[in-house]
């Protein structure tokens, strides 16, 4: 009963002990309490009760009862880090038990051996147990044994065998009332989905399991560990680190299993390394190594040593000793049959290459490269990365490019299984090294066109296809509505200086639920087979005499690729780090200029613009011609106000996340009907003063303001519109970019809302602060309002990269729409609108803060 209704079982066991039971019944009660404390409470209390249960079983002279208690005690001792004592108790239980009871003890020794990383021995024990359990028709213990065997198969990389066992176990669980075991089965299916590469299904199943555990009131430390693994694979390492550290805090607070603490420390170390926190990773991994060693868990200790070495390398350490240590770890992992062995061989090869040890590097990389043809996507990626490094060491540029192409194709196929744009964007981080290797090989070969192709291959890939639209989901709609209401109440409370902590907590809870539902979506869009064609780009540029400037970054330096007049030319710019610093100075200056009385800052901002031009365009600035210019910056330069650069200041200028994205926008047809939508949100300093004027200009436009500017109605009218102008407060959420929002009458409209549109407006103008701010994630990806719109049918956006003065925005917007009504593109109209603004610092800064994105 303890795994059917754990808390009820605990209460009944305590009631039995209060009634002066016989030694046999008291032994059972103490065992129930011991198991409950072992799995969900204090290990010291667990060991006390299980030892008492063992002694009472001996007094009752029941060999099978004693064997059963010894098995439970053995598992507890293993979890407490007392490995030898635990295995001895389990061995004694096998000796004391017979028949059916012995099979149950064998199952529990198999479980202990799985915890210890002794996978082959665990399989042998469970192989002996299952026929006996089936023979006596013990459904519950047969299902447990099948679930355990499946879990061991996963640890050894045998996904198909694990699937078969999980399926058989699930059919048995459906016939029982074992609610905790059923939750564990759902959790196990989540692990299987993850091992087979289905991250959305893994997240969905783990969330479902957590809900089941919550109803039972039991902690979920193993689930925390597994979710950390999935979050890391999804590119969400900071979240994984937070989850692992929080679980460690809870476990320490209850005096829980030291085995689980070691596993959580290992998960935290992996997450910290992936999050770029090398020293945190070293500290966590070192603690995990020591705990695993003390627990005599060699399999786990070896994995922790691998993470410790990875963290030390990330912290800048490199030595012959590290090569030897990593090679030893790789050899040990291979002896265990661990899927992580190629990863260790790759690391040994990398370190050896860095030291110039070519022969050693070739040996280790050759071993790692064997994984490129089989296994889950990330394992094959490891193999192709090793193959690319081998080719580079051998001086084969063609071999480097081919290995990088094959590896990125594997990751592309994996990314397209992800429905959420956030996951697709973050997953690209796993291909960053391959993309960089291919770009460097292209640069070394001296071909600017090839470098352009590889710069495009792994840039803004999340925009190449729309995210999976969530199905009609009344619960999601309800949560979104509740989120808007709570967010609006919180905003109102802040305005009235009332306390908001409770409202903010509820808002965060609703955000988590919305995000979780989105991350569960599986991709329904197959790869479209799109391959960037530089010839097609040059043809389109030539039609309008446009120059496209793509900025690639290799070894920290900007490479300027100038495309136009039928060719691609390369120029060298400055250091990316210097450009980022200068861009931050410019942003600070624009914030100051948004307020009257800061005119003295104007020369400083203009000087920074000149320095940015030197760093980002270099000699290319003199070869831009007289026509329009499209700038394609890397994601880390998304906040540059490009119109501030002297050579771009009076040009028709647009910005695009990638050349491929610009091509798609250029070839996007406007919707039929030419419907215009004008939206005015609440709380603007000017009251959205341009909107009434624009309503007069466009005549039949749909105008949504006051109570009409509610999110459902706004979304309904935006869907399929030719032109939308939204005057509303914008909020950028660096912590959660897909909750960046525009404030409507009933609360915020967020990126998740826009992603539910069948077709976003062909042209959209966002006349408020910070609407062109993005989070840079993955390899070279952007998440934010503007980038959410581009894959959904929007061909052009005007938005703002900095805080602006609301009053100064009004004349800019009126002039912009005048140009649009005369048939100009967004970029042309914005250029002309800047030119007619008053010449004071306030209006100049306002003009520079807005950019045209896309090609409409």
Image: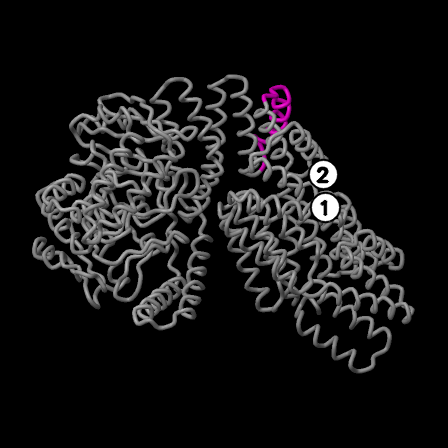
Q: Is residue 91 left or right of residue 704?
A: right
Classify 26 as above or below 440.
Answer: below
Residue at coordinates 34% horizontally, 54% vertically from top-left?
A: 740
x and y, in percent, of residue 736 in the image: 40, 53
- Residue 618 image-quadrant placement: top left
> What is the crowding at mark 1: few (fewer than 14 residues within 10 Å), some, or many (at least 20)?
many
x and y, in percent, of residue 441 in the image: 44, 22
> Who is closer to the viewer here, 650 or 271?
650
Q: Residue furthest front?
A: 600
Q: Residue furthest bottom?
A: 19
Q: Is residue 226 left or right of residue 589?
A: right
Q: Look at the image and tell me whether residue 583 can be seen.
A: yes
Is-magenta flag for residue 94? no
x and y, in percent, of residue 426 in the image: 44, 44
Please identify the quadrant where the C terminus is shown: top left
Count the marks: how many?
2
> What is the crowding at mark 2: few (fewer than 14 residues within 10 Å), some, or many (at least 20)?
many
Residue at coordinates 55% horizontally, 37% vertically from top-left?
A: 314
> In the rendered image, which residue does mark 2 sit on?
336
x and y, in percent, of residue 728 in the image: 23, 58
Classify 394 as above or below 512.
Answer: above
Q: Earlier in the sequence, mark 2 or mark 1?
A: 1
> Who is closer to the viewer here, 833 or 100?
833
SS of the residue at dot 2?
A: helix
SS of the residue at dot 1?
A: loop
> In the rendered image, which residue does mark 1 sit on?
117
Chain part drawn in magenta: 356-375
Please identify the quadrant where the N terminus is shown: bottom right
């Amino acid at each position: 009963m303890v795994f059917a209704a754990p808390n009820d079982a605990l209460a009944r066991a305590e009631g039995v002990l209060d009634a002066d039971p016989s030694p046999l019944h008291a032994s059972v009660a103490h065992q129930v309490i011991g198991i409950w404390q072992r799995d969900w409470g204090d290990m010291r209390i667990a060991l006390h009760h299980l030892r008492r249960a063992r002694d009472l079983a001996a007094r009752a002279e029941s060999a099978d009862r004693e064997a059963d208690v010894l098995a439970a005690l053995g598992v507890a001792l293993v979890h407490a880090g007392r490995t030898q004592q635990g295995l001895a108790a389990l061995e004694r239980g096998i000796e004391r038990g017979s028949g059916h009871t012995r099979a149950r003890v064998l199952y529990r020794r198999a479980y202990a051996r799985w915890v210890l990383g002794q996978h082959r021995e665990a399989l042998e024990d469970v192989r002996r147990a299952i026929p006996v359990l089936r023979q006596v028709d013990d459904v519950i213990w047969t299902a447990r044994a099948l679930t355990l065997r499946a879990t061991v198969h996963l640890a050894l990389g045998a996904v198909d065998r694990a699937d078969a066992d999980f399926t058989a176990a699930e059919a048995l669980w459906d016939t029982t009332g074992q609610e905790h075991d059923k939750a564990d089965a759902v959790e196990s299916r989540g692990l299987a989905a993850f091992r087979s590469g289905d991250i959305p299904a893994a997240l969905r199943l783990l969330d479902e399991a957590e809900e089941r555990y919550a109803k039972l009131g039991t902690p979920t430390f193993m689930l925390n560990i597994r979710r950390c693994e999935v979050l890391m694979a999804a590119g969400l390492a900071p979240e994984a680190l937070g989850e692992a550290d929080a679980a460690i805090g809870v476990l320490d607070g209850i005096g829980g299993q030291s085995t689980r603490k070691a596993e959580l420390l290992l998960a935290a170390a992996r997450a910290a390394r992936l999050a770029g926190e090398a020293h945190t990773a070293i500290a966590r991994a070192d603690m995990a190594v020591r705990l695993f060693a003390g627990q005599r868990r060699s399999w786990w200790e070896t994995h922790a040593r691998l993470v410790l070495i990875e963290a030390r390398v990330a912290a800048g350490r490199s030595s012959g000793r590290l090569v030897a240590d990593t090679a030893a770890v790789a050899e040990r992992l291979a002896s265990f049959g661990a899927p992580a062995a190629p990863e260790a061989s790759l690391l040994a090869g990398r370190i050896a290459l860095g030291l110039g040890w070519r022969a050693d590097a070739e040996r280790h990389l050759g071993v790692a490269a064997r994984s490129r043809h089989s296994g889950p996507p990330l394992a094959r990626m490891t193999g192709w990365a090793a193959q690319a490094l081998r080719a580079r060491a051998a001086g084969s540029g063609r071999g480097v490019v081919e290995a990088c192409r094959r590896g990125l194709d594997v990751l592309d196929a994996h990314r397209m299984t992800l429905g959420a744009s956030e996951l697709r964007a973050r997953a690209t981080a796993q291909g960053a090294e391959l993309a960089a290797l291919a770009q460097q090989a292209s640069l070394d070969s001296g071909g600017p066109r090839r470098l352009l192709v590889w710069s495009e291959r792994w840039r803004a890939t999340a925009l190449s296809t729309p995210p999976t639209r969530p199905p009609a989901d009344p619960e999601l709609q309800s949560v979104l509505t509740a989120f808007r209401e709570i967010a609006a109440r919180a905003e109102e409370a802040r305005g009235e200086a009332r306390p908001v902590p409770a409202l903010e907590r509820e808002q965060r809870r609703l955000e988590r639920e919305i995000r979780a539902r989105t991350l569960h979506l599986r991709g329904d869009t197959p790869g479209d087979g799109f391959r960037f064609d530089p010839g097609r780009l040059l043809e389109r540029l030539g039609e309008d005499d446009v120059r496209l400037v793509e900025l690639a970054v290799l070894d920290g330096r900007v490479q300027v690729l100038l495309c136009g007049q039928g060719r691609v030319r390369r120029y060298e710019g400055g250091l990316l780090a210097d450009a980022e610093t200068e861009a931050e100075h410019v942003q600070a200056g624009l914030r100051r200029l948004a307020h009257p009385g800061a005119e003295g800052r104007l020369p400083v901002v203009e000087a920074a613009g000149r320095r940015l031009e030197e760093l980002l365009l270099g000699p290319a600035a003199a070869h831009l011609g007289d026509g329009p210019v499209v700038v394609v910056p890397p994601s880390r330069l998304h906040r540059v106000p490009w119109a501030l650069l002297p050579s771009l200041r009076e040009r028709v200028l647009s910005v695009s996340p990638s050349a491929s994205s610009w091509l798609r926008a250029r070839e996007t047809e406007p919707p039929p009907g030419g419907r215009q939508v004008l939206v005015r949100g609440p709380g603007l300093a000017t009251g959205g003063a341009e909107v009434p004027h624009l309503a007069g200009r466009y005549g039949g436009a749909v105008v949504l303001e006051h109570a009409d500017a509610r999110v459902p109605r706004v979304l309904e009218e935006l869907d399929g519109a030719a032109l939308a102008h939204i005057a509303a407060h914008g909020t950028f959420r660096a912590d959660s970019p897909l909750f960046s929002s525009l404030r409507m009458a009933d609360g915020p409209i967020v990126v998740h809302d826009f992603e539910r549109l069948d077709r976003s407006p062909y042209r959209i103008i966002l006349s408020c602060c910070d609407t062109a701010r993005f989070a840079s994630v993955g390899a070279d990806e952007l998440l934010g309002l503007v980038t959410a719109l581009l894959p959904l049918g929007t061909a052009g956006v005007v938005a703002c990269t900095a805080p602006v003065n609301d009053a100064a925005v009004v004349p800019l917007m009126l002039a912009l729409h005048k140009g649009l009504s005369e048939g100009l593109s967004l970029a042309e109209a914005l250029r002309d609108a800047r030119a007619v603004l008053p010449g004071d610092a306030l209006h100049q800064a306002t003009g520079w803060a807005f950019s045209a994105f896309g090609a409409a």
